[in-house]
Amino acid sequence: MTEIAGGVGKQVDRDRRHAAVLALRELGRSHDYRDRADAGHGLAGFAEMPEARGPLLELVLDPGDTFVTRVTVEAVLRRKDRIGLAVVASALAVTDSNHSDWIHTAILDVFSIFSEDRDNAMQLCEKMLRDTDDRVSLGARQLHEILAEIDPVLRPV
């Protein structure tokens, strides 16, 4: 039971992570936009878990308030990994112009500072263009175009 490096500890962590995702999914169903934004921000940390992806996409496309969209997109993009980019790409493929504007704003906020971050995201998008999920590949093309327009403030010396 007290095994640190064994499977017991890993199972406890997995159970706790699953419980956290369930709690955040429930919070994401709140009538209050602030709760939904907090849920999106929190779920971003669990985006690698399959049970978090659907709720994340729902919060990115929140029909009640684009503040939820902005907070959730920014949080998943700050992961700076393929999983976060794929969530945003999936949303871009199906979103309306209002949500698209807020997604675009979050992309600018996250990738306008360091050129290395923007360049890495562009490389991941290029790989996602070949994704078997049509929404991801279509959205990756749009995301790549947005990233290509960004002129980051800081570049390597």
Image: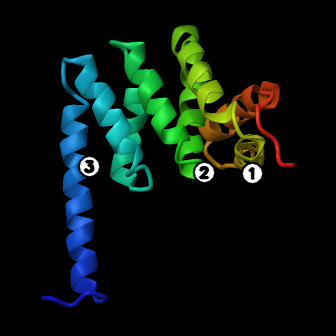
Tag 1: Cα neighbours inside 10 Å, few (<14), some, or many (≥20)?
few
- Using residue 153 as the reference point, say whether residue 38 is left or right of it: left
| Mark pair 1, 3: CA separation | 28 Å
- Provide the secondary structure element on which disc 3 rests: helix
| Mark pair 2, 1: CA separation | 9 Å
Mark nearer the viewer, 1 or 3: 3
Residue at image location 43% in from the left, 27% down from the top: 71
Residue 45 place in picture, x, y as percent: 39, 49
Tag 2: Cα neighbours inside 10 Å, few (<14), some, or many (≥20)?
many
Q: Spot the residue most to the right.
A: 157
Q: Amino acid at mark 3?
A: Val
Residue underneath mark 3: 21
- Using residue 54 as the reference point, say whether residue 91 is left or right of it: right
Does any portion of residue 55 appear in the rendered image? no
Where the N terminus falls, by quadrant?
bottom left
- Provide the secondary structure element on which disc 1 rests: helix
Residue underneath mark 1: 127
Does any portion of residue 99 appear in the rendered image? yes
